[in-house]
Amino acid sequence: MQRIFIVDDDPNIVSLIEMYLQREGFETKSFSRGDTALGALKADEPALVLLDIMLPGMDGWEVCRELRKISRVPVIMLSAKEETFDKVQSLALGADDYVTKPFEPQALMARVKAVLRRSTGADTEGTLRFPGLTVSLAAYAATFDGEAVQMPPKELELLYFLASHKNQVFTREQLLEKVWGFDYFGDSRTVDVHVKRLREKLPGSERFGWQIRTVWSVGYKFEAE
C-alpha cells in the first residue's frame, strides 16, 4: 500500500484529504509543522508528499528546498495563493505540481494519481547518450560533463522525452500531454519553468553539439548534430 504524507496545519483540510486518499487505498500520515515533516522525510520516504506552503516551524518552500537535497519523492504543493509567482517558485524548487485551495477533492485525487503514475518509472525505456550527457529513465539519473546532476523526476522525464526525439519540435501543450500526462491540470508555464531549470543545470551544452532550443511561437526541441 502506497503511503502519502500530508503536511498542513488545517485539521479540516487534513481530515478531508485523508478520507479521500484512504478511500482510494492509500495509507496516510499527517504533520502540522514543516520542520517536523522534514525530520520524518529524512527518516522515511513516502510515495508522495502533499505540502502546504504556509506552515509553522518551516514553510513549505523551505521544506521542499531541503527535501530536494536528499530525495526525489514527488511533491504537490497546496496553497491558498493564486499568484503566478507562488506557482513558479514552487515548481522552481522542485515541486511536481501546485494545487490552489479551495480544491475539489476528486480533482486532487486525479492529480495525485497522475503524479504517482509518472514518478513510478513505469516507462523504463533505457538510457540515452550524447556527448557530455547521459540520461537514464530506468535509474532516474543523469550526468553532464562527467558529473552527476540532481533532477526532480519531471525535469529528468522532460529531458529524456526531448532527447529521445532529437530535432523534433514540440509545443508546450504537447509536452504537458506527453510528460505530465492527460490528467495534468496545469498550464504551459510549467514547461517553461522546467526548461529553464534544465538549462541552468546543463550550462554550455552547445559546446558538445546539442542544446534545448526555443522555437519561437511554437515550443521547444532538443537540437543535436
Image (spheres, grey):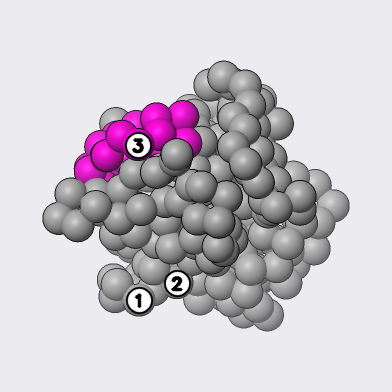
User: Which residue corresponds to the image point at 74% horizontal and 45% vertical from the top-left?
Assistant: 45
Q: Nearer the viewer, residue 139 or 130?
A: 130
User: Which residue corresponds to the image point at 45% horizontal and 72% vertical from the top-left?
Assistant: 89
Q: Which residue is disc 1 drawn over?
A: 85
Q: Nearer the viewer, mark 2 or mark 3?
A: 3
- Give the CA separation, mark 1 to mark 2: 6 Å
- Give the CA separation, mark 1 to mark 3: 31 Å
**Do callouts 2 and 3 mark residues in contact (Cβ within 8 Å)?**
no
User: Which residue corresponds to the image point at 43% horizontal and 63% vertical from the top-left?
Assistant: 196
Residue 142 image-quadrant placement: top right
Q: Which residue is disc 2 drawn over?
A: 89
The magenta stretch spans which residues?
A: 162-180
Neighbor class of circle 3 (other Cα within 10 Å; few <14, some 14-19, many 20+) is some
Residue 15: numbered disc: none
Q: Give the residue type at disc 2.
A: Gln
Q: Give the residue type at disc 1.
A: Phe
**Do callouts 1 and 3 mark residues in contact (Cβ within 8 Å)?**
no
- Give the CA separation, mark 2 to mark 3: 30 Å
Give whichever of discs 2 and 3 has the lower sequence position: 2
Q: Nearer the viewer, residue 60 or 167?
A: 167
Q: Which residue is disc 3 drawn over?
A: 167
**Do callouts 1 and 2 mark residues in contact (Cβ within 8 Å)?**
yes
User: Which residue corresponds to the image point at 63% horizontal and 27% vertical from the top-left?
Assistant: 127
- Left or right: residue 94 compared with residue 141: left
